[in-house]
Image (tube, rainbow, N blue to C red):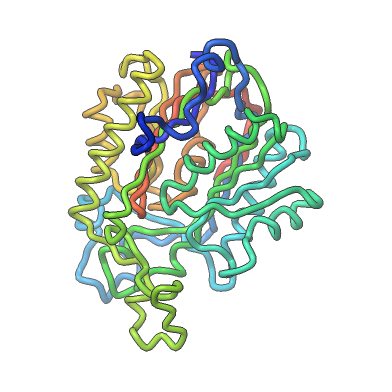
Amino acid sequence: MTVAEVICDSPIRGHGRERKPFDLPEEHVMTSSISSVVCGIGAYVPPRVVRNDDPAFSALDTSDEWIRSRTGIIERRWADPGTSTGDLAVRAAERALLNAGDRGVDLVIVTTTTPDHRTPSTAPAVAAQLGLGTVPAFDLGAACGGFLYGLATADVWIRSGAVERVLLIGADTLTTFIDPTDRSTAVIFADGAGAVVLRHGEGTEPGAVHRVRLGSDGALKDLVIVPAGGSRAPDPEVTEGRRRHSVNMQGKQLFQHAVSRMTESSRAVLQDMQWSADSVQAFIGHQANQRILSKVADLVGVSEESRFGNISRVGNTSSASIPLVMNEIDMQPGSKTLLTTFGGGAVWGSAALSWPILTPRKGN
């Protein structure tokens, strides 16, 4: 497979045949080797470390053993009050641009659930702070699936010829959206940012994005939701209470759907690429829960030594989690890499790429 393709899992019906949006025409697939290529990675997490025995959790009916056994988390990073998603995004992006060796980009995408403001978008301010001038910049909201949705978007922009280079940032400060009295979310979510630079290139190059599959099911929107604060339930005076303005999560149902969808989409991408599971050299899932990650990897058939993660040290950082892991590992350029995610919406996706050629990077 020498061409990057974006495929939606859900076919469009009612027009005489089934088709999949973003699926390339057969003649294009057969002749084109254009691809987006990862050429830089950077990440940043706040310095504050919050361990399972931190006083912040003292009022919850929980313990270090309870949290570890159910989530795999030992500690997480929290941003200090006044530190925004945009602040974290800028730090990660600076490192990614430095790693890429060229600050020039034609487009900035920030994937986030926790923007600095309802309006305007966070991305233009991030671009301005980075000194990138008047490049197009926008936010993309797909919850914990944001990074792969952003990767697919950046890939399409590059393959279309509209841009040469894209800065893609996944960043969230989820601690601003959690209820500290809700142990199902308070001990899980954390803050961080990860970024990649993608450039126009060839599908045969190390770093090439080969395949992205995305899907969604709005019937599952209540799995992970902030019920109030949007246009459906504005509640500007917060009369409905803090819980309605915080992340609400149906843990058991979320586990089942996440395992099912991440497994299905991972298998589909492997089939598209004609890769066997045991040929995957780097498997990186959204760092939501270690039990989910292990179950998906087992079902897909990925070997233990090819599984990478950091949830034990940074918690669930939503759209930042996959690039945070990518920033921590070093692989042989060209290594077969499988990414997968599931998030609120519900949304999910998986991607196949070859590991890029990278210069040494600064840690998270």
Residue at 49% from the left image edge and 32% from the top image edge = 22
Q: Quadrant of residue 340?
A: top left
Is residue 255 left or right of 150 when viewed as pictured? left
Q: Quadrant of residue 242?
A: bottom left
Whether 111 is drawn above or below 245: the answer is: above
Residue at 75% from the left image edge and 52% from the top image edge = 130
Q: Residue furthest front?
A: 16
Is residue 159 left or right of 325 when viewed as pictured? right
Whether 129 is drawn above or below 281: the answer is: below
Residue at 41% from the left image edge and 27% from the top image edge = 338
Residue at 38% from the left image edge and 35% from the top image edge = 15
Is residue 330 left or right of 308 when viewed as pictured? right
Whether 239 is drawn above or below 288: the answer is: below
Which quadrant holds the C terminus? Answer: top right
Q: Give the camera-side residue of 337 and 150.
A: 150
Q: Give the camera-side residue of 27 and 323.
A: 27
The x, y position of residue 193, in whole percent, is: 54, 51
The x, y position of residue 89, in whole percent, is: 61, 53
Whether 81 is drawn above or below 305: the answer is: below
The x, y position of residue 17, in whole percent, is: 36, 29
The x, y position of residue 205, in whole percent, is: 60, 16
Is residue 130 left or right of 166 when viewed as pictured? right
